[in-house]
Image (cartoon, rainbow, N blue to C red):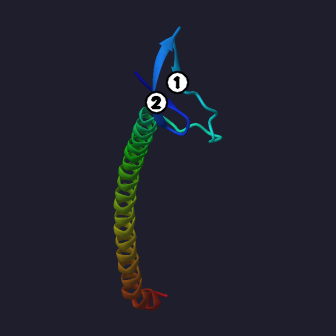
Amino acid sequence: MTARFGGGYLRTAFRLRGWAIPERAQPVATAAPTPEPADDHRRLAQAVEALVERFHAIRAENARLRRDLAEREERLRELHQRRQDALKRIDDLVARLDALAPRLEESA
C-alpha cells in the first residue's frame, strides 16, 4: 500500500485503525501540504462549471439586451414615421393657409 507523505512523495505504508502510517516517517519540510490530484481535478471541475454557468447567464443577458434594443429601434422607427407624418400635415396646413391668405385679404 502506498500513501502520500511529505511534499507529495509516495512511500510504502500500512493502515492501523484507519490511519496510513509511513514506514520511515520523517518531519515534513514543506509548510503547506501538496494538494491531492483528485482535489485539483475537483477544483478544476468546479471552476469550469462556474464558468459555464456564468457563460450561460451572460449569453441570456446578451439575448435579452438584443431583444430590448430591437424593440427600441422599432419604437424609434415608429416615432420617426409619426414625426414625418406630422411634418407633412403641418406643411399641408401652411400651404392651405398661404392659399387662403389672398382670399382673406380680399374679403377684409
Q: Position of residue 63 (x, y in %)?
A: 35, 50
Q: Is residue 85 left or right of residue 101?
A: left
**Amino acid at dot 2:** Arg
Q: Position of residue 97 (x, y in %)?
A: 41, 82
Task: Judge by depth and name the residue closer to the eye, 87 or 92.
Answer: 87
Q: Residue at x 46, y 30 (%)?
A: 11
As drawn, 23 above or below 47? above
Q: Residue at x 40, y 42 (%)?
A: 48
Tell how many labels. Answer: 2
Q: Quadrant of residue 30?
A: top right
Quarter of the image with the N terminus is: top left
Q: Secondary structure at mark 2?
A: strand
Q: Position of residue 105 (x, y in %)?
A: 46, 90
Label 2 sits on residue: 11
Task: Judge by depth and name the residue closer to the eye, 80 or 98.
Answer: 80
As drawn, 50 above or below 94? above
Task: Judge by depth and name the residue closer to the eye, 28 or 95.
Answer: 28
As drawn, 36 above or below 62? above
Q: Position of residue 32 (x, y in %)?
A: 62, 39
Label 1 sits on residue: 22
Asked whether the beta carbons under mark 2 and mark 1 sit within 8 Å of each other, the answer is: yes
